[in-house]
Amino acid sequence: MKRVILVVVLAALLVPAVCRADDYVIGEGDVLSVHVWGEPELNSQVIVRPDGKISMPGVDDVTASGLTIPELKKLMVKQISLLVKEPIVNVSLIRSVNSRVYVVGGGVDPRVFEMSQRTTLLHVLASLGSLATADLTKAYVYRDGKKIMSDFSGVFSKGEFGKDIQLEPGDTIYLPVKYDQNVYIIGAVAQPKAILFREGLTVLDALLFAGEFNKYADEDELVIVRTNDGKKERITVKTEDLMKKGELQQNILLQAGDYVIAKETFF
């Protein structure tokens, strides 16, 4: 009976700590406390070694890195049960040193993001402030020597949340500078100009900025010249179908660096 009461009291005392630590992912270098009730010789403070494992009296080489605190506690109960019948075990985080994500690339100020719980890419991006100077299409997450995700524009700018990923300690988020932040509309328009690019900018938006066509324009179509991976491509837009027939598939989304060229005609 006393043991049952003791278990209830301990559970009540430990709930706040567990609630705070449920989502924390243990990493190499973290310092943990393992407490076994009534077995002081087993109580230990342990450091997660570079191989991701911990050891304590009577228990050798338990993998802790990558687990949450509750997951490790469950594993330690199983291991300590080989030494003590029905052990009451508590595992707590003393010091975290390896829960960091690094943001580099020049598109934003470089920084170190401390993860106190499970964190996704979108959560980190949302914490960085303005990303107006970052090229999200060329951004990527680097982990264990390879890129694991590229192009953040969908998850951050278009609401494609299914593309969001869980970050892990040591991940590097690369956000390069968006060197060309303009769209250029030139040729037979009233006011040729450079337009500061924004997500969602379309051909029709660009025409409105430029005051539409001038009197020498071929109003039937215009051309978008776009550079991808060093290669130029030409995209024809049937402007007559867009503006007079309302065919919205012709209202193409523009990208930073695009040239929108309105051709001239003399007939």
Image: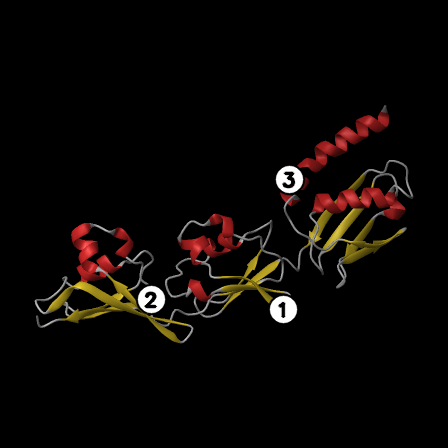
Judging by the rendered image, the residue that carries numbered circle 3 is 19
Q: CA distance from mark 1 to mark 2?
A: 30 Å
Judging by the rendered image, the residue that carries numbered circle 2 is 256
Q: Mark on residue 45?
A: none
In front of the other: 214 or 239: 239
Q: Amino acid at mark 3?
A: Cys
Q: Is residue 97 above or below residue 8?
A: below
The percent coordinates of residue 170 (x first, y second) are: 62, 62
Q: Kindly identify the residue that appears in the image at 74 percent across and 52 percent down.
A: 32
Q: Amino acid at mark 1?
A: Gly
In front of the other: 187 or 176: 187
Which quarter shows the C terminus? bottom left
Q: Amino acid at mark 2?
A: Ala
The percent coordinates of residue 127 (x first, y second) are: 47, 54
Q: Mark on residue 145?
A: 1
What is the quadrant of residue 136 in the picture?
Answer: bottom left
In front of the other: 73 or 204: 204
Query: Judging from the image, what secondary structure is the residue with disc 2 in?
Result: loop
Which numbered disc, 3 or 1, marks the residue that appears first in the sequence?
A: 3
Q: Is residue 264 above or below residue 87?
A: below
